[in-house]
Each structure stands twice: as structure tokens, then as C-alpha cells.
Amino acid sequence: MMNNAVIVGGGPAGMVLGLLLARAGVEVTVLEKHADFLRDFRGDTVHPSTLELLDELGLGERFDALPQRRISSVNAVLDGGTLRIGDFGLLRSPRPYVALVPQWDFLDLLAEAAAAEPTFTLIRNAEVTGLVRSGDRVTGVRWTDRSTGAEHTLEAALTVGCDGRRSVVRAAAGLRGRAFGVPLDVEWFRLPREADDPVGGLGRFTRGQFAVMIDRGDYWQCGYLVRKGGDGPLRALGIDALRRRLARLIPFTADRVGALRSWEDVSMLDVRIDRLRRWFRPGLLLIGDAAHAMSPVGGVGINLAVADAVAAARHVAPALRVGSASSVPLARVQARRWLPAAVIQTVQRAAHHVLLSRSLRIDPDAALPERTELPAPVRFVQRHPRLQIVPARLFGLGLLQEHAPAWARRAPAVDGGVIVGSTS
């Protein structure tokens, strides 16, 4: 039997789209490559726009019950002190903060909510290997069960690629885009967290060295920025080189950098920014990183992908209810979401150039300066604190905030008079 829609990738975009389409009564299947969501994700920041969406979907109380940290401002630690560069508390939002929550918990929450809908199916261990076509139209996917090796074909009126920056769907469709130069990559690793450590996120910047630390409760998820192509030379110096740099850059980590026993404890994130010129073909749509890979600057990738999913559901669900999917609603999704993606990528590229590119050319083992000179735009914002609402608005709510369609909204679940998932 043909599904109305098949979604490739069970990340935030895929799960939100699957949930929304199911609530519209659309027969939808999500194919997830892995057996579960218990993996190290690099994006765990859930911004006000997504938090508001969860409230609209009736999932806010259940989300609040997940283990999380909340931050109301974005701060950077420089050589001369701590600098606030964005204040979410200035937003007119019922959720004026960013939640740092393990992505596997977030995805499990979405999966459980979607499973309550009779037209939703999630297949795990399903690795998509190609597209099925009829003429120039995509009519489904071929996939392999990774647990048994069995090969399958799943036909659908619409196939949606939500499978990330290295999208198999994008490659199979032959969709091409524009890649923008990026001056950095990120070394990704964990460090133990102590009870008296700072709470929330931490960014440390100086000439030649940059690091971010995400508070995950009992450990820090850390990113150490290196010049593009600098991973090999750094690894050639041995793990002690990374330990020394971290201890020097963030002194309170000196007593725990030994947790990095070898380079096997460190993974390299190949940072990319690209954007497809065309996000769709007949019977096929790409959203999220599959359509526009983002830099980690601003931590906005999850939230932009979720917004794509909401816009996609709003435009394609009416057509899919009757089993068809012309290119008209697909084009409307791209028309709606192209500008928000392009603007964020432009801001990220500017941050790369102004804040990172030149500094990453400096020898990170040279003496640290007494004080880091701030770029002019940052100095201007410091003189006018109310302007901190600009980055908070852009990264927190987005250029075009997407809200749940009326047919997808739910009140919080109630069991025996008590809201399920309430933290009160």
C-alpha cells in the first residue's frame, strides 16, 4: 500500500513533520537509520520558537519534565572579562530562554507523541539507499533493514529528505547547491562536570583559540575550534597538546582534561554552510540541513529545521489528505523558508569572518594577550544593551516564526485531573 508520505531521517525536522502530518490524518512513515536516539548529538539547544511550538502542540509540560538547563542570555568569556552578547529575557515570548536538553530525550518525546496518532509509523534501523522513480517523479525510497539485511521498497505520494548535511536523498536526487567557504572545524568531546562549575553554556574566546562548553548536567559537551584543515596537524601533536590548550584557555578544566585519554575520545565536526538552489523535485522535498547546512554559530540548526517542518506540514498536508502532492505546495515551502535560512547563514558567515577567520590563523600556543580587542559591532552592542534583543530575536524566534496549524494543536494531556509531565 502506498503511504501518503515517507520521511527519511528521524531527527528533529523529521519527527516534527511526521507528528504534524499524522495529526492532519496523513498516512506517514518515518525511516530512521539507527536503532535508537542514544547518540552524541552536537545540537542540544532548543530555542524559544521551538519551545512555543511545543506548547501549541500540547507537549510543553512533558518537555519541561525532561532533564535540562535553561539560559536566558548568551555570554562569552574574554581575556578582559565576561561579555553578554544576547539577552533572551528581552523577548516578548512566554519562553524567554534557551533550553539545553539532551537531543535523544527530545526525540523520544516527539516519537511518543507521534506514536499516539493512528496514521504514524516509525521504522528504526532503516537505512535509505536510493529513490524510486516513475519518469521524472520520485515515488518512494529503497531501504535496507540494518538488523536483518533485508531490502525493501516503500512507495509514497511525497518523499521528504530530513537526513542532514550529508543527505543520501539529496545525492540520489542529484540536487545541487551553493557551498560557502568556512574557516573552521570543531573538535567535539566530553569533560566531567563538577557541582561548583558554571551552570548553562560557556563560550571562551581569545586570539587564536575558541571553545564552547554545553552543560549536560553531569558532564560538559565541549567544542574546540580549529582552523579548517587543522585537525590533522593538531592530532599529530598528540592528545597532550589539546589538553594543554584547554587547561590554559579555561583554567577550571585543568584538573579534568586527563579524561581525554586519546584522540579516540575526540571527534571532528566538519563545519559546512551550503544551500540548495532548489529544494524540491516532483514528489520530493528537502528541508533542514539536507536543504541548507548551517554553521554551529548561534546553535540555531535544530530550530531552523523544526520551523521548516512546520511550514512543510502546513503547505503539503491539505494535498496529502487526498493522496496527491504537486510541486506547487513544495515550491511554497521553499519560498517561505528560503529567506530565514539565507539570513542566518549570512550572519554566520559574517561571524566567521569578523570574529574567527583572522584569529584562527594565530598560533594557539603563543602567549595569551592581556585583553582581546572586540570587533566594532560587538563594542557598539555593549554600549547599547537594549540592542542585545537583536541577536536574541534573530536566533531565538527566527526571521519568520512558524506556529502550529490549528489542526495540529492540542491541550496538555490530562490524566485523572493532573497534567501529565507537570513539574509542579
Image: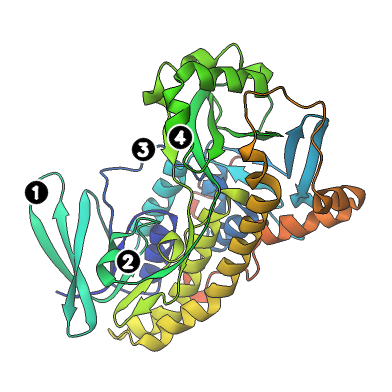
The residue under label 2 is 170
Residue at mark 2 to residue at mark 3: CA–CA distance: 25 Å
SS for tag 2? helix
Does the residue at mark 2 contact the one at mark 4 (Cβ under 8 Å)? Answer: no
Query: How many dots with numbers?
Result: 4
The residue under label 3 is 38
Amino acid beneath label 2: Arg
Give above or below for 163 relative to 97. Answer: below
Classify the position of the C terminus by image quarter: top right
Tag 2: Cα neighbours inside 10 Å, few (<14), some, or many (≥20)? Answer: many
Q: Is residue 42 visible?
A: yes
The residue under label 4 is 231
Question: Which residue is pictured at 50% across the width and 45% down the height?
Answer: 43
Give above or below for 366 relative to 5. Answer: above
SS for tag 3? loop
Q: Report which quarter residue 166 is drawn in.
A: bottom left
Between discs 4 and 3, the one toward the N terminus: 3
Give above or below for 294 relative to 371. Answer: below
